[in-house]
Amino acid sequence: MSIIINSPQNTQIKAARRLSQRRYRHEEGRLLIEGLRLVGDAWRSHVYPLQLFYNAELRPQAAELDSLLREMEEQNVPTFACSEAVFAHLTETVTPQGIAAVVALPQLPLPPKVTLVLILDEVRDPGNAGTLLRSAEAAGADFVIFGPGSVDAFNDKVLRAGMGVHFRLPIRVCSSWAELKGLIPADLPLYLAEAASQIDYDRVDWRKAAGLVVGGEANGAGAEMRQLAQPIAIPMQGNPESLNAAMAGTIILFEAARQRRQQ
């Protein structure tokens, strides 16, 4: 039978709640995820929760929630029922769906050979970051690097926007340029999405191994990355100022996928 938690000062709740902070996520190697979609995606990706919390008052009314909880309970996942007030204290969303889980911070192995990698450089908007992760997976990228100055890949808003990609696609968070450079082959050509470039993105031979860099929403990529990557542009008609980071990255990723399908 599940343990019922009625106080936000409960040790388990306090430990899980502090995983909303980047520092504790990376220090402890654990992550708090919430919502039926995200917890369900993790479970179907064979991620075994270290702890599972649910709203005891909501479970009897929600068949999908009850079904997922039963599956996990049958596999002996440590499960904790919470009062509605305690569960609301635990989660970040305004309208929580009644389920949250603590899981190990995803660290999927990198492929032995790099063919296409996406690098986020100073991308700070969680929605853009999550969308780029989904596009990278759909376009067949090998892995994604979050460079220095970018939003944390495991921020709760990035997790929600990523819709489960974190549990299927290798992601690396780099705190230094030395760390980032160590993840990619020295001879791997890098291309930077840049509105002012004279080289069009579809003139690049994406059938060859390459890295795509998407810079930040306000100021683009940082000076270090500009020294490493060749700028490429998306030609546009009319007079738009620019495309946002997620849209530009998605267009180029799918051009790479198109060329590779025709190879």
Image (cartoon, rainbow, N blue to C red):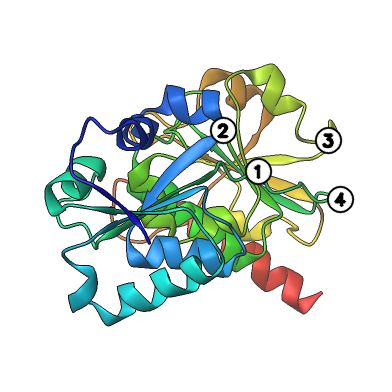
Question: Crowdedness of circle 1 by 10 Å Cα count: few (<14), some, many (20+)?
Answer: some
Q: Earlier in the sequence, mark 4 or mark 2?
A: 2
Q: Nearer the viewer, mark 4 or mark 3?
A: 4
Point out residue 197 in the picture as x, y percentages from the top left corner. Answer: 53, 41
Point out residue 62 in the picture as x, y percentages from the top left corner. Answer: 23, 77
Q: Amino acid at mark 3?
A: Pro
Point out residue 212 in the picture as x, y percentages from the top left corner. Answer: 63, 46
Residue 174 seen in the current view: yes
Q: Are marks 2 and 1 in contact (CB under 8 Å)?
A: yes
Q: Nearer the viewer, mark 2 or mark 1?
A: 2
Query: What residue is rendered at 15% in x and 57% in y?
Result: 95
User: Which sits in the foreground, 201 or 85?
Assistant: 85
Label 2 to label 3: alpha-carbon separation: 27 Å
Q: Is residue 109 left or right of residue 250?
A: right
Label 1 to label 3: alpha-carbon separation: 20 Å
Q: Amino acid at mark 1?
A: Gln
Residue beneath disc 4: 113
Q: Earlier in the sequence, mark 1 or mark 3?
A: 1
User: Which sits in the foreground, 241 or 76?
Assistant: 76
Q: Nearer the viewer, mark 4 or mark 2?
A: 2
Mark sitting on residue 29: 2
Query: What residue is rendered at 58% in x and 53% in y?
Result: 200
Residue beneath disc 1: 107
- Report the quarter where the N terminus lies: bottom left
Q: Earlier in the sequence, mark 1 or mark 4?
A: 1
| SS under mark 1 | loop
| SS under mark 3 | loop
